[in-house]
Amino acid sequence: MIYLATDHAGFELKEEIKKYLGELGMETEDMGAFHFDPDDDYPDFVIPAAQKVSENPEENRAIIFGASGQGEAIAANKAQGVRAAVYYGGPLDLVKLSRSHNNANVLSLGAKFLTLEEAKEAVKLWLETGFDGGRHERRIEKIKTFEQES
């Protein structure tokens, strides 16, 4: 399952990416915002999406949206087992490495800095990229141990 969440800053992009994911045959659940409200707050939507990912962090994923994507990723990363990576433009290798090296299960998109086509390209690459495992698995395990000790 791919969970989607945003506040007002990413609302339009979320709606377009939701359609795009449907075209790709992906199963999604929209966690909100469900309408444009310039006074809403991203934690109200991003935290529930991150909690859904946390229920099964190896299978569930989320794509979250904000102006820069930074605050949204910070909020999402508070949920155990969530590894949120931010993308707001630049080399697509950043998106690929977030999956192949860090096994990111949440992609936080900076809607203010991305065109729809750039966002689609990033989402598609992120969904198609697998985790390399190996030495990267050792690092993920260290993060998991830290989470459990905290």
Image (cartoon, rainbow, N blue to C red):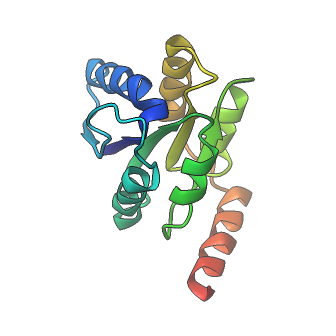
Residue beneath the point at 46% across and 48% down: 42
Of residues 129 and 98, the one drawn nearer to the viewer in this rendering: 98
When the figure is inspected, residue 101 is found, relative to residue 93, above or below; the finding is below
- Residue 59 visible to an observer of this rendering: no
Asked if residue 10 lies left or right of residue 146, the reply is left
When the figure is inspected, residue 81 is found, relative to residue 108, above or below; the finding is below
Residue beneath the point at 26% across and 24% down: 22
Q: Within the image, what quadrant is residue 44 found in?
A: bottom left
Q: Within the image, what quadrant is residue 55 found in?
A: bottom left
Quadrant, the C terminus: bottom right
* Residue extending furthest toward the front: 39
Asked if residue 120 lies left or right of residue 86, the reply is left
- Residue 123 visible to an observer of this rendering: yes
When the figure is inspected, residue 140 is found, relative to residue 105, above or below; the finding is below
> Where is residue 10 drawn, in percent x and y?
46, 31
Q: How many marks?
A: 0
Residue beneath the point at 56% across and 25% down: 122
> Where is residue 8 drawn, in percent x and y?
43, 35
Of residues 62 and 46, the one drawn nearer to the viewer in this rendering: 46
Residue beneath the point at 50% across and 50% down: 105
> Where is residue 125 drawn, in percent x and y?
54, 26
Of residues 27 and 109, the one drawn nearer to the viewer in this rendering: 109
> Where is residue 57 drawn, in percent x and y?
43, 60
* Residue extending furthest toward the bottom: 149
